[in-house]
Image (cartoon, rainbow, N blue to C red):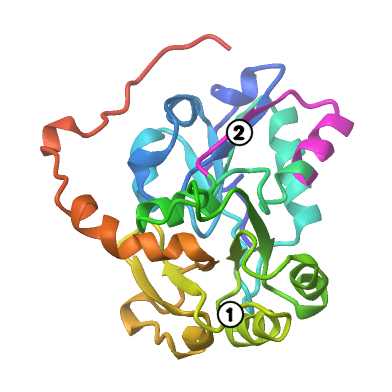
Amino acid sequence: MSDPTVNGPTASGPAARSTGHVCLVGAGPGSADLITVRGARRLAEADLVLYDALASEEMRVYAPGARWFFVGKRACRASIDQEVLNRLLVKYARRGWRVVRLKCGDPFVFGRGGEEALALARAGIPCEIIPGLSTAVAAPALAGIPVTHRGLASSFAVITGHHEATYAPLLDGFAPDSLTLVVLMGLGQRARIAERLVARGWSPATPAAVIVGAATAQSWRWTGALSALDAAEIPPASAGAPGLLVIGAVVSLAAELAAGLSSVTFDSADAFQPQQENTQR
């Protein structure tokens, strides 16, 4: 794997600073204009950006002077080891660089941001946490699905669907049709998840949704019954994009809300424009 040292800042640039720091920045659900204002400011100040596979390439506009280095992890694909990534964060901060670790969604929601923050704390590296819109909540919202709604769901749970040994005990602990269930990284396990819930007493007719791509150009959505969850065929244009499942009565609101959501338009002049700042930190 390559190293961001190649063509990186020189001794006359950030390396001349005695102390660097790291900002763990949540990139949100995909669209560049859904990052927080503070996150965009830290990108503008960055010397180096270590970014995830799911962080929008459009966000490079916020950090035109920084070096960008891909450290993303995707299922079933070769990726950088977490310990190696932790060492990179420490290494370049110690060289005086301002490092942004750009993570999809929120850094602390299934993003291993806690591990990275601990590694930095143990190494004595200053670290700032900048929350982002968690895909667990933002992706359903963009699809017209509120994760809680009076009379339908007073609570929600977020789990990962990578391995049945991990999610099975959690699913077994939820009373049937008692809450909204959001399953991140569960597309490949959706048939088993549906089968297990029905076996535990959930109604086969429980509304369910598959949301792929969130706020990206690969966005795609499907709604139907829990029993038909495995029948949702993701189109080729969205294949490979990250996705999640939403299961519960609140999914029934998506069709009614869809017309109103799709009718809202804004002029391009209203788009957020990043501000270049000379901020002393």
Give coordinates of residue 124: x percent, y percent. 85, 26
Give coordinates of residue 113: x percent, y percent. 70, 44
Which residue is labeled 1 in the image? 203
How many neighbours does mark 1 have within 10 angstroms: few (below 14), some (14-19), or many (20 or more)? some
Which quadrant holds the N terminus? bottom right
User: Toward the viewer: 113 or 150?
Assistant: 150
Is residue 144 left or right of 122 when viewed as pictured?
left
Give coordinates of residue 184: x percent, y percent. 60, 64
Which residue is labeled 2 in the image? 99
Question: SS at mark 2?
Answer: strand
How many neighbours does mark 2 have within 10 angstroms: few (below 14), some (14-19), or many (20 or more)? many
Q: Earlier in the sequence, mark 2 or mark 1?
A: 2
Residue depicted at x 65% and y 17%: 17
Magenta span covers which residues?
A: 115-133
**Residue located farthest toward the front when viewing the structure as drawn:** 151
Residue depicted at x 43% and y 30%: 40
